[in-house]
Image: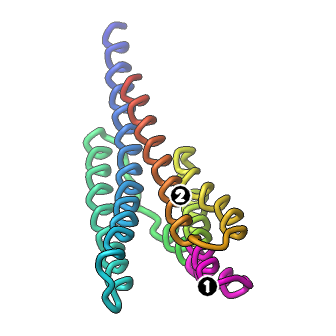
């Protein structure tokens, strides 16, 4: 009977560590994009070269794949080491929401909007993030912690439509707020899992 209790204890600790590792993995991904976005705002005020936006964001997306891939690989190794069965990752669950976000958020919504170019850009950016992350949440994670990452940008669209100036910067800060809250919530969940 004592051995069964001890085994149950060990399994619960392993489960807690896996939950914590998953939360930390998600937090790292959002933290990466928060850093990339903040760095873009800093660099764009100092360097203004032709094509910089395309080069920067192409590099950031490539870097995002590398960071996510490395962290995901470590998470999978942790699962395997704990004896868990790991299935294949459904990549279409990432491609569909982000493609939808690009088409609807970056193209359809701004084209149909009768507003100043800065407002169109801000609404497009917020729509892209909100649609893409909502789709990713619905098809992949369904984590409560990631809700601020798409809900705050979605709600920010309402405010941007009432603004006359500074909409692009404000939209960026709204996204950063959603991502920051998401990172904090994931880290909080990780600590709660470890404390169990």
Task: Name above or below for residue 80 compared with residue 61.
Answer: above
As measured in the structure, the alpha-carbon distance from the residue carrying label 2 to the one carrying label 1 is 34 Å
Confirm whether the magenta stretch covers residue 106.
Answer: yes
Foreground pick, 181 / 101: 181
Q: Secondary structure at mark 2?
A: helix
Horizontal side of residue 141 vs 151, given as left or right: left
Q: Contact, CB < 8 Å: mark 2 with mark 1?
A: no
Q: Residue furthest front?
A: 165
Q: Determine whether the residue tagged by mark 1 lies in a helix, strand or loop.
A: helix
Residue 147 x %, y %: 58, 50
- Residue beneath label 1, please? 117
Q: Is residue 135 left or right of residue 44?
A: right
N-terminal of the two: label 2 or label 1? Answer: 1
**Magenta region: which residues?**
100-125
Q: Which image quadrant: the C terminus?
A: top left
User: Which residue corresponds to the image point at 45% horizontal and 35% vertical from the top-left?
Assistant: 189
Q: Would you call the spot at circle 1 few (<14 residues within 10 Å), some (14-19), or many (20 or more)? A: few
Residue 151 location, x and y as percent?
A: 62, 55
Relative vertical location of residue 123 with respect to residue 5 in this rendering, above or below: below
Q: Quadrant of residue 70?
A: bottom left
Q: In the image, is residue 95 part of the stretch drawn in magenta?
A: no
Say the numbered circle drawn on residue 74: none
The structure residue drawn at horizontal position 71% and vertical position 64%, both measured from the top left corner, is: 158
Color theme of the render:
rainbow
Q: Is residue 56 above or below residue 14?
A: below
Q: Quadrant of the N terminus?
A: top left
Out of 126 and 23, give the one closest to the viewer.
Answer: 126
Residue at the image point whose x is 62% and y is 70% from the top = 127
Residue 190 place in picture, x, y as percent: 40, 36
Disc 2: which residue: 140
Magenta stretch mostly in which secondary structure? helix
């Amino acid at each position: 009977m004592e051995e069964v209790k001890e085994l149950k204890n060990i399994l619960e600790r392993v489960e807690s560590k896996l939950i914590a590792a998953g939360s930390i993995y998600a937090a790292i991904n959002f933290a990466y994009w928060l850093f990339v976005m903040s760095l873009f705002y800093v660099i764009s005020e100092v360097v203004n070269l032709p094509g910089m936006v395309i080069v920067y964001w192409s590099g950031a997306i490539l870097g995002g794949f590398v960071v996510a891939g490395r962290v995901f690989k470590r998470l999978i190794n942790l699962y395997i080491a704990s004896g868990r069965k790991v299935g294949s990752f459904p990549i279409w669950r990432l491609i569909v929401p982000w493609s939808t976000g690009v088409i609807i958020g970056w193209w359809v919504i701004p084209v149909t909007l009768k507003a100043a170019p800065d407002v169109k850009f801000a609404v497009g950016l917020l729509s892209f993030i909100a649609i893409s992350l909502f789709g990713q949440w619905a098809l992949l994670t369904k984590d409560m912690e990631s809700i601020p990452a798409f809900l705050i940008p979605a709600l920010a669209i309402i405010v941007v439509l009432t603004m006359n100036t500074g909409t692009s910067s404000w939209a960026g800060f709204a996204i950063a707020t959603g991502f920051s809250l998401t990172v904090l919530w994931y880290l909080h969940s990780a600590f709660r899992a470890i404390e169990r």
